[in-house]
Structure formats: structure tokens, C-alpha cells
Image: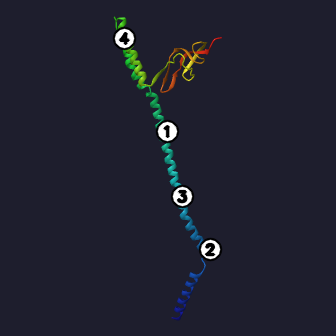
Amino acid sequence: MEYVMSESHENTENKEEILNAEPSQEVVEQVDVEEAVDPLHELEEKVAQYHDQLLRAHAEMENLRKRTHEEVVKARKFGTESFAESLIPVKDSLEAALNQKEQSLESLVSGVETTLKQLESAFERNQLKEIKPEVGEKFNPHVHQAISSIASEQVEANAVIECLQKGYTIADRVLRPALVIVSAGKSE
């Protein structure tokens, strides 16, 4: 029994030594590796999350690009649809006037005036506006095109003397500038 006691006494001493002893390098390294694995795992999860977000953002941009392209194609294809619908009654009126076999000059003039009103209405609905400068209006190179310049006593220099052809804008964009004659100033 003494033998057993001494062994148990030795075990107790060994346990105390182990508990009081400094941790060996192997134990420290093992703890450090375990501590390092946890942040590494977190970082890997974040990288995977960011990669997923990047792929989703890329897919969304690609879908947006395709939708935008389709909308542009449709806008080009059907952009003039409203304007064309406005012009159909004008064409119908002109054809009806030509199909009248016997008509008086007054009825022809009346029909042309009605057709012109239809055309003006179509222009108005589609934001197509005339550029018709008045005599004396200052020359504006953005909406006027000078064909020639003439010396004039009545109109100041660089002003419109005569409008030869109306211009047109659509939604504030010049389709055709007005053709004008401009004053070069007083003749000497």
C-alpha cells in the first residue's frame, strides 16, 4: 500500500508541477494557430461575400445595359410614330382634294386652308415650331443662315432685312435654320 500511496503522492506532485510550469513552445504555437484560424476564416467569408456582391453588381450592370439598348432601339424605331399619326389626316385631305373631279376655286382654296390647319396642328402637337424672323430682328447664327448681306439705310447692321425661307425647330433643336438676307450697315 505504501507503494500506491507514494505513486499517488508523486502524481499529485506532477500535477502541481504541470499546472505551475510555463507552457511549452508547442502549446503556445498550437493556441496561436487556433486563434489565427478563426480570423482567417472570417476574412475568407468576407472575401467570398464581396466576390458574390461583385458578381451580382456586374450581372445587374449587364442587364441594365441590355435593357437600355433595347429601349434605344425601340425609341428609334417608334420615335416618329406620333408624328406620323399626326400627318396621316393631312395626306387623306390632300388625296380627297385631288379626287374631286369638278370643284370650284373657292372650294379648293378652302380645302387647302383646312389641310394647312391640320398640318399646323400636327406640328404643334409634336413641338415643331417655325423660325420666321421679322425685318430688323438681330441676326442669330444659331437659328438663321445668312445667304447674303446688303447695305441698308433702314435697318441697322447685322439685322435681318428679309426672310427667304422659314426655319424649323423641334423641341428647341434646330432642324433647319431660316434663310435670311442680313444688313451690312449703311451704304456710303
Answer with left or right where residue 50 lies relative to residue 95. right
Residues at marks 3 and 2 touching, judged by CB atoms closer than 8 Å: no
Q: Residue furthest right?
A: 188
Residue drawn at point x = 51 percent, y = 45 percent: 58
Considering the image in quadrants, where does the C terminus appear? top right
Q: Amino acid at mark 3?
A: Glu
Mark 3, Cα crowd under 10 Å, few <14 / some 14-19 / many 20+, is few
The picture places residue 40, in percent across and down from the top left corner, at 55, 61
Q: Earlier in the sequence, mark 3 or mark 1?
A: 3
Residues at marks 3 and 1 touching, judged by CB atoms closer than 8 Å: no
- Front one among 53 and 154: 154
What residue did someone put label 3 on? Answer: 44
The picture places residue 66, in percent across and down from the top left corner, at 48, 38
Mark 2, Cα crowd under 10 Å, few <14 / some 14-19 / many 20+, is few
Tag 1's secondary structure? helix
Residue 37 position (above or below residue 138): below
Q: Earlier in the sequence, mark 1 or mark 2?
A: 2
What residue did someone put label 1 on? Answer: 65
Tag 3's secondary structure? helix
What residue did someone put label 2 on? Answer: 25
Answer with left or right where residue 102 lies relative to residue 158. left
Real-space Cα distance between discs 3 and 4? 83 Å
Here the colouring is rainbow
- Front one among 29 and 182: 182
Q: How many numbered discs sit on the rendered protein?
A: 4
Residue 36 position (above or below residue 142): below
Real-space Cα distance between discs 4 and 1? 52 Å
What residue did someone put label 4 on? Answer: 110
